[in-house]
Amino acid sequence: MQARAVLGRAAVCLDGRNPLMEHLKTLAAVVTATLLSVGPPAAHARDAFNVNEVSQVAPSFVHYSHDMLRKLWERAELSPRDRSLVTLAALISRAQTIELPHYVGQALDNGVNPGEISEIITHLSFYASRANALSAAAVVRQVFAERKVGADQLPAAEPKLLALDERTEANRAQLVSQSFGSTAPGLVQYTTDVLFRQVWLRPDLAPRDRSLVTVSALVASGHVAQLPFHLNKAMDGGLTQTQAGEVITHLEQCSHR
């Protein structure tokens, strides 16, 4: 409740009157600049990161990477499970599939179940492109096969949806309509009917985790304009101020892998 009060209840906060939100936006912008400075990610959907092979070329790189990542993943501000969600969202949103097999396996070990990973891919097809979701699905399919994950462990295509907060959704839809209704009414209808009245209500990924994945993907892919709304939504769903800040830290450090 205190975190929500600090961030405010406005769906969009762009006027600079919220110091914490502006600070998070600034941090996110810095992380985005770092991520984008490396250029377009290479597509290696069927490759796998091999420590021994990299050590034959750059042993010091492996040394520093392992030391940094070990310390990062040991930080208490986010649980290992949350860090797995953040990492998967970042890798998928940037089509960085070379490390995806390792981190999908680690996510399963950290308590993210196959159904949740499946939902992350579906969710990010709307926020990080259908093409990136398809690339991720090809990699995850291999990991699921190795782990003997069956179809019975995956979400139904059309499950019973969670209850919709009609008042909150009406406010969101009104904001989108005011911004885009006169120029792109189809966008308003699509985001309302499909994204917020269906995808966000799918039960196999908790709303708080769905928000965590969304915020991580937006930062990693450089779409910071949507961050105020989704940070507020995440905190309404249970993400704390400390956890929100640590998401930025995690993404910034992971950009140096």
Image: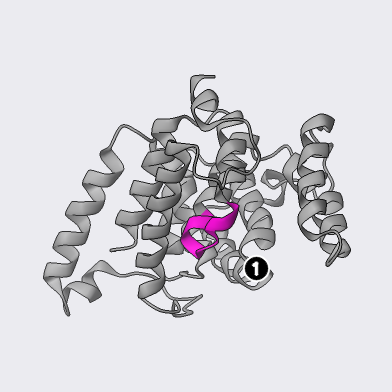
Q: Which residue occupies 64% across, 52% down?
A: 118
Q: Which residue occupies 48% across, 79% down?
A: 43
Task: State the scheme by which the image is colored.
Answer: one colour
Question: Which of 24 and 150 lies nearest the eye of the viewer?
Answer: 24
**Residue 223 magenta-highlighted:** yes
Is residue 129 depicted above or below 20 in this figure?
Answer: below
Determine which quarter of the picture holds residue 134.
bottom right
The residue that mark 1 highlights is 129
> Which region shows up in magenta?
217-226
Image coordinates of residue 247 in percent, x first then y, are 41, 44
Element under disc 1: loop
Crowd tier of the residue under label 1, counting other residues whose Cα lies within 10 Å: few below 14, some 14–19, many 20 or above = some
* Left or right of residue 74, residue 214 in this image: right
Question: Which of 88 and 168 lies nearest the eye of the viewer?
Answer: 168
Image coordinates of residue 91 in percent, x first then y, are 47, 62
Image coordinates of residue 41 in percent, x first then y, are 44, 76
* Left or right of residue 251, residue 131 in this image: right
Indicate the amino acid at tag 1.
Ser
Q: Main secondary structure of the magenta part?
A: helix
Question: Which of 240 and 54 lies nearest the eye of the viewer?
Answer: 240
Image coordinates of residue 58 in percent, x first then y, are 16, 75
Is residue 232 depicted above or below 14 in this figure?
Answer: above
Q: Which residue occupies 39% across, 32% down?
A: 242
